[in-house]
Amino acid sequence: TEEGTTEEETTEEGTTEEATEEEQIESVSGNEIMDEEVPLSGAMTVSLEPVTVNGITITVSGAASAFADGTTVSAVEVEPTEIVIEEAEEEEEAVIKRYKAFDINLVSNGEYVQPLNGEEIKVSFEGDLLIPDADKNEDVVVYHVAKDDAITKMEAEVVAADVNSSDNTGAVEMTTTHFSTYIIAITGEEEEVEVTINHYLAAEKEIKQDNKKPLFLSQKVTAEIGGTISDFVKGGNDFAVKEICLVERKTENTITLSDGKYTVDSDTAGSDVTLNVYYTATTDEVDNGVTMFDYEDFVNYNSREGTAYESKSINYYKNYESYVPVTYYEALKNNKNLKRWEFTNNFDKYDQQKDRKNWNGRFATKGAYQDYQTLSPNTNGESVKVNDYKTEDQIIKGLLVNLEGNDYENVKFQFEDPGFFTNEPKNGKTIYNDYSLVFKRSGSKYTLTEVKKDNGSGWSELNNFWPLDPEEHEFSDNGHNEYFGMRYDFKFQIGDYVGDLKYEFAGDDDLWVCLDGKVILDLGGIHQQVTGSVDLWTELLNNDDYDYDDKVNYLLDDKEELTEAAKKVHTITVLYMERGGSKSNCNMKFVMPNFIPKDPVITDAPKADLEIVKKEHYTEQAIEGVGFTLYSDPDCKQLKNYEKNTNQNGAVVFEGLRKGTYYLKETTYNSEKYMENDTVYRVEVTVDVNGKATATLYDGFEVVAKDSASGKYLIYNEPYASLSFKKIDGVSKDPISGVTFKLYEGANYNENDTPFKTAVSTNEGEVKFEGLKVGTEYLLVEKTPEGYVEVKTPWIVNVGYDVASGEFVSKIFNSIWDSENKKWQKDGEAYGKAVIENTPAPGSLIIKKTVNKVDDVHGVATFTFKITCPDGSILYRTITFTEDDTKESCTKSVRIANLPVGDYTVEELPTLRYKCVSDSEQTKSVEANQTTTFEYENEKCFENYYSHADVMVNKVTFTKDDEGNTIAQISMEKSSTSDEIIENQEGE
């Protein structure tokens, strides 16, 4: 019915119909507890049955007259908004250290009710969490929270459980005349704790705390009680968090972060906190460039005549700067080849041998292999020949001195070499630039799995290691392409990493590992398979007996910030040669953090640069900080080059790409501002007839367009748009806070579907959705707030970009269900302004009248009630008891529905022969979708000037005053009949 012409019904107890659905209390769920009914009687003080919610016991007590018969307590724990807590802290000028909030109600006959007659009720909250600690200068406050989040401070005190007790036990008590949401908060000074965050591999969890081996530097963070810490997880792309544990008395309890944040719980007050973060290794494959050197040699000198063959060998005498031409070509004596560079090791002296036998036993006064420096003896003290071979493991240390140059490109041996690991052309040497090494990565551990050629072919037999067999070669070398070398480089950075740091090798022959040009692992010589490893911490710390504290001192300065040493980017160079002419093994693995692949230092291959510029679609603005990663496979599993980020101009360059096919993917972007770009681009590097390399970027089969301004390949990021509107009350136009909205993509949705986005209106009623896709249609669904008419249809939202204004535009439309196509479609024009209104839901009131001993002998009993509405308007209702009603006691009621929410005052007007024994004027609140009951009780009485035989009639006349207000005039007249009884009147 219309407001002001309200729906009305009168029922009599004992014969009343079942309460309508809107009058009934919803069934309890979650943390809500509704107790059994407790009958009340008399004027004594009574306590309703307590309820306990999440460890807090709530007791309601007061005069029996304040409660209707069968009143129970209902309590639900709720979570107030952050704004409510902030307002409370501002008012208290203190920090709220912990709190509980409850929606408390009285329930009678299945309806929410308030205390009768406006009497004060005492509410008690009992639980350790809500008792302030006097030793910490804590205090307790209680606030009433209105539906608009406005707060009102209530009088409250702590009542000790035992007056003689000094501990923090007891209850918090307050008084109220109205039940709603209340916050019980403990305030005090800011209290801070130190949070220590440790980082370990998952296997360390089974080890005692003091014996765990850290993976990264521990962190110490100061946080307030109730505050949060975030961004403490490490590992980058190498490790993933498996578990986070809170250490309590040497026991680890798994915790879950909320949005990546850890909240310092009040239970930890007064003590420091330790978190252990456990990681598991992530895995993938890494592709690192390598330069391969094919060294030719021949075996049987007795079957070769002249210099034709010698000139094709790496041992050709002209490959040595100190050579002196001789009559006979010089070969190594007695059918020996590259592995037999012959000179006598005379300990620490130089061997200046100049007389050597040629292949047929003759001596040459000057030969091709003279003036070699002598080296230190073998590790067992035996005098050995550097190029000789024995069956036992024979490592000749000191052959490599160091690496020099800006890129460590110059290799310095302690003997004259024929051009190993150089880019200069030499007889018997071929350089291959189209190979790479494939490493399997697990965390920070890298294991060599394959030598791969750019055409896709590869060699993965590491214990039968002949990667150059597919290449053409002059000599068969016993069925294999023997005598070869390889060099590769990579970079790494320590950062805050404190885990293992080592390089390991098992194979033959020469293997040298250099750190920033310094030899740190020396397995030189011709030998069977040997193993060797180096702990790089010993090199960095210059300490063979280091501990964790040494690492900390190396990585952190006095301000607990990373040192320059921790930030330094180091270069690892690995040189390997197979020159034994027999078996070949090459097993390599290393553990390094923050691995950075590096293009080959020694190469004569043409190279190209790939230049990209990143811009925002529509606005053409350059985007800084977008990360791109280069891969060598279309599935983007084998890293070719680690991530590079665009600069402030949106540009990024991948330099030095050799001929071949690569794959480019966007791996880092601002996910809050831009849509994900999951395109895998193909990069083709080709070399023309003039030897010039060119990199071309493809999206599928189409070449990516270039930016007209910079000439670089242009890749757009699609920006997200936003949707903003205001939520207000349709009558008062006041903002409505706490309303939940959900966005669904498409033209249909199911309530069980996961929404694309969710937003909640602020105290100002503002609602904002970020991250919407331009050109996409959404359904906007509202969870109707309590007290308002339910919204049953979604709105349709269109997100677009207005080129003329240069702004993103989101339009909101009403919708209608298209039953034929099973979807929601637009209904009418878009909203003219970004405002969505809610129509307040009506409530209802019941006036319940009880008469003790109805006297129909003297006429029908008629009672009139004046109802003053929140806006000041007046309604009148009457309740009549007829001769059919019981003679002893009778209760009747009148219900007025569709009332606006607010405070109503009901006044019973004077009536003949009956005295009102309850308050004749009562004020109560009518809530949305709820019924408020006003109860009145009358007793029969007789006036002296009326005879028992007279029939008295209550006559009510309605008139209007000069201002248009309705006035009820009551007169009492004698009558011998009851025909003039006035029926229920409709008010205005």
Image (spheres, rainbow, N blue to C red):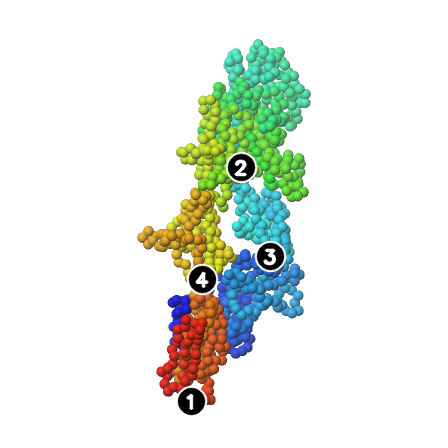
Tag 1: Cα neighbours inside 10 Å, few (<14), some, or many (≥20)? few
From the viewer's perspective, is 528 left or right of 980?
Answer: right
Secondary structure state at the residue bearing disc 4: loop
Query: Can you say which quadrant of the picture contains the C terminus?
Result: bottom left
- The residue tagged 4 is 731
The residue at 50%/62% (across/down) is 147
User: Pointer 1 and pointer 4: residues touching (CB < 8 Å)?
Assistant: no
Earlier in the chain: of badge 2 and badge 3, it is 3
- The residue tagged 1 is 948
Question: Is 623 rendered above or below residue 225?
Answer: above
Frontmost of labels 1 and 4 is: 4
The residue at 58%/17% (across/down) is 320
Secondary structure state at the residue bearing disc 1: loop
Frontmost of labels 1 and 2 is: 1
- The residue tagged 2 is 647
411 or 173: which is nearer to us?
A: 173
